[in-house]
Amino acid sequence: MPTREGQPMNPHAALRHATRQRGQSLVEMTVLLPLLLFMIFGMVDFSLAFSAHTKLRNAVAEGAYWAAQNPGDENGIKAQVVLAAEGLDPPLDPNRITVTPCIVVNADEYEAEIALSYDYPVLFGFFGAGSQIELSNSTTIPQFGDCR
């Protein structure tokens, strides 16, 4: 019979060693699995929040494009921003959009400022039910022509 460090090898000892290894692997997996899932769900949530922020940035840019062509049209600017932010869940609240048209820079120069904020609902609320992250974006653009 083979020996281990000069002692005869017991066939039952090899079985106990294999069982102990399986138990150790189970404990390691039990400890690491929640951490791994937390990281994966966090990455998914971050990527969805980043996508929503990008959509908001593009919506503000669309509103700025509208404001440059239609100086002083505050309702039209808000409508363009809401239209460009279509697909957000929950939808963008028009009351959270701030439009400041016709800001006087010089005697003949005007600017418009568009700002918005959006409460992104965290998908995997590790910090409690109903967790939200406030996303915001703004831009200032020159307005050509007269302000109404």
Image (cartoon, rainbow, N blue to C red):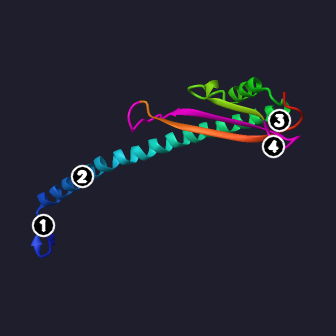
Q: What is the crowding at mark 1: few (fewer than 14 residues within 10 Å), some, or many (at least 20)?
A: few
Does the CB distance between marks 2 and 1 fall below 8 Å?
no
Magenta stretch: give its range. Answer: 103-129
The residue indicated by pointer 3 is: 68
Count numbered badges in the picture: 4
Question: What secondary structure is marked by label 2?
Answer: helix
Front-lying residue, 65 or 115: 115
Question: Where is 76 relative to 118, above or below?
Answer: above
The residue indicated by pointer 4 is: 105
> Is residue 106 in the magenta section?
yes
Residue 66 position within the rendered picture, expressed as x and y whole percent measured from the top left = 80, 31
**Image quarter of residue 48:** top right
User: How many angstroms separate mark 2 from mark 3 (CA)?
Assistant: 68 Å
The residue indicated by pointer 2 is: 22
Q: Quadrant of the N terminus?
A: bottom left
Does the CB distance between marks 3 and 4 fall below 8 Å?
no
Q: Inspect the image, locate mark 1, and give the three-letter code of the amino acid beneath it.
A: Met
Q: Earlier in the sequence, mark 3 or mark 1?
A: 1
- In this rendering, would 55 be left or right of 7? right
Front-lying residue, 141 or 135: 141
User: How many angstroms separate mark 4 from mark 2 (CA)?
Assistant: 73 Å
Q: Quadrant of the C terminus?
A: top right
Which of the two discs, 4 and 2, sits closer to the camera?
4
Which of the two discs, 1 and 4, sits closer to the camera?
4
Question: Where is 97 relative to 140, above or below?
Answer: above
Q: Earlier in the sequence, mark 2 or mark 3?
A: 2
The residue indicated by pointer 1 is: 9
